[in-house]
Image (cartoon, rainbow, N blue to C red):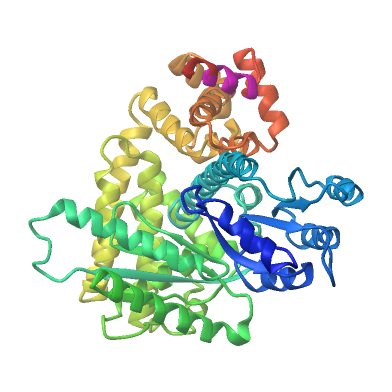
Amino acid sequence: MYRIMLIDDEVGVRNSIKAKIDWKSAGFQIEFEAANGLEAMQILSEQPLPDVVITDVRMPQMDGIAFIKASKEKFPHLRIIVLSGYSDFEYMKAAIQLGVKDYLLKPVVRSELTALLAKLSEELEDDRNRIREQDQEEMKNHQQLQLMQEQLIWQLVKDEWFSVSTVKERMQQLQLSSLTIDDVHAQFVTVEMRIPQGRLDDWSERKDLLYLAFQMLCRESAENWEQVYPFYSISHPAMMHFLILIQDPVYHGRFMDDFVRKLKRNIKSYLRVESVVGIGESITGLRQLKDGYASSMLAWSQGTIQSVKAEPNRNMLAMTHAFSPEVERKLMQTIENLDMPAFTKQLHTIFSADRDTPMFVFTFLTLRIILLFNAIAKKFELGDASLQSYLWNCQMTVRDYSSREQVLEQLHEMAQLVMNEVRKTRFSSGQQMIEAIRNYVDENFSYELTLASLADMFHLNETYLSGLFKTSVGITFSDYVTKLRLSKATVLLEENELKLTDIATLVGYSSSSYFSTAFKKYYGKGPKEYREELLSKKV
């Protein structure tokens, strides 16, 4: 039902128009009435806008032309129909110049009114369909962008990094520029949904639905707050993480309290389950992202369903200086070089017996090392990713370790398992190494990948890697990346939803013009032409 506002200074004229037809049967209802333009502007400012305004041109205080001018400025999309007599030529001329397309002559003839309303009904329906399609497209674009943002943040938390400059460039492409500031301040929040024992045990499908509802609720909760970015691991769907920018340090504590309290309340109210929350220590700069995540996991491990929040010691990161980026790099080298004695030495440096390390710091360092193990395993493990799943479970159960000796023993066992995977890939056939590199490229094609960076990452000579890649894959590395990016682009073009600029960003091109040039060179036609041909085949 479309809503109409009727404006005329004569009550008799308004009543006559209302009595002309069965408005409801025509799909319309007269929602508002006004005696002049001034009164109409006041109603429009206070009430939801009608779909159509029918206005006389000769009225006191504010005539129809003045009303059209004022409403066009304040409500540019408002559809207006003018009522006029045969003697109102100058008024009509002015109305047409202001963009009014439809009019009715006084006295209003029933057939003309019916015909005009039928025409308006079609136009309004077309408008609604167009707006609906635009909203759906915007929603799909937003969901696609949100998915890419989540994947990037999760990748930065758990995987080996590219250079900071490369990471910042990708963040800017995905509209995460606020995270690229050198001294950006942030905090992580971890929340786990606790499903009561026995509930849904025989309803695995319903459990999946509950996980989905939990994730959607967390994302919706995040959208109500500025600079809150949710993400999660597919291997643990009952847990969500949030990266939260600290915009005002003075009020941030209150912000976090409100956010956590409302999040827990929503989970309990809508999903009928309890939750455990952990708030990590505040961090400064992108290089501390892994520290921030690990501290929120530690806080979560110490939390209960009764506590509103659980925070680690505020000075924890200051007490973990032994795990510097340089120490982390050396630790990674010992694993990837299969040097267990060197690993043990590095571990003893981190967990020095000379220091009385508090248990919560000990646990935090363990979490950081498990994150390092996971990054290496992901890089070298081929097949079913069972080692990565095992390491994730170790991260989730680190709070259950009863002593420091047990922790060190577990870390050595994990290190040995990771080394075994590295050995299988590095020191077997060159084909397995290329498969690992291809897996890495397939997941990270949207970054600016180079043979030099990959050779360094996988401990190979660049020239050797270039030849091995071409021999094994059949094309050069650069051609492989181009083919991969553009094939991903064709899939997105077939969906006919995303803009070309968005597709260029998603597949790793810095500009739409560069993307279009590369696409045309590869396929012999531009992406726009490619999409138009796909659409014509569907018709």
Residue 240 placement (x, y as % from top left): 37, 63
Does 207 sit left or right of 82 as displayed? left
Magenta segment main secondary structure: helix
Q: What's the residue at 66%, 20% (across, down)?
A: 526
Residue 208 placement (x, y as % from top left): 23, 53
Up-down: is 514 above or below 205?
Answer: above
In the image, which residues are magenta? 528-535
**Is any part of residue 342 visible from this angle?**
no
Up-down: is 11 above or below 421?
Answer: below
Q: Is residue 531 on the magenta stretch?
A: yes
Q: Is residue 490 on the magenta stretch?
A: no
* Between 297 and 30, the one nearer to me in the picture: 30
Q: What's the residue at 65%, 41% (across, down)?
A: 112
Does 316 sit left or right of 428 as displayed? right
Q: Classify residue 483 by image quadrant.
A: top right
Up-down: is 416 above or below 497?
Answer: below
Q: What's the residue at 72%, 52% (across, down)?
A: 80
Residue 275 placement (x, y as % from top left): 28, 74
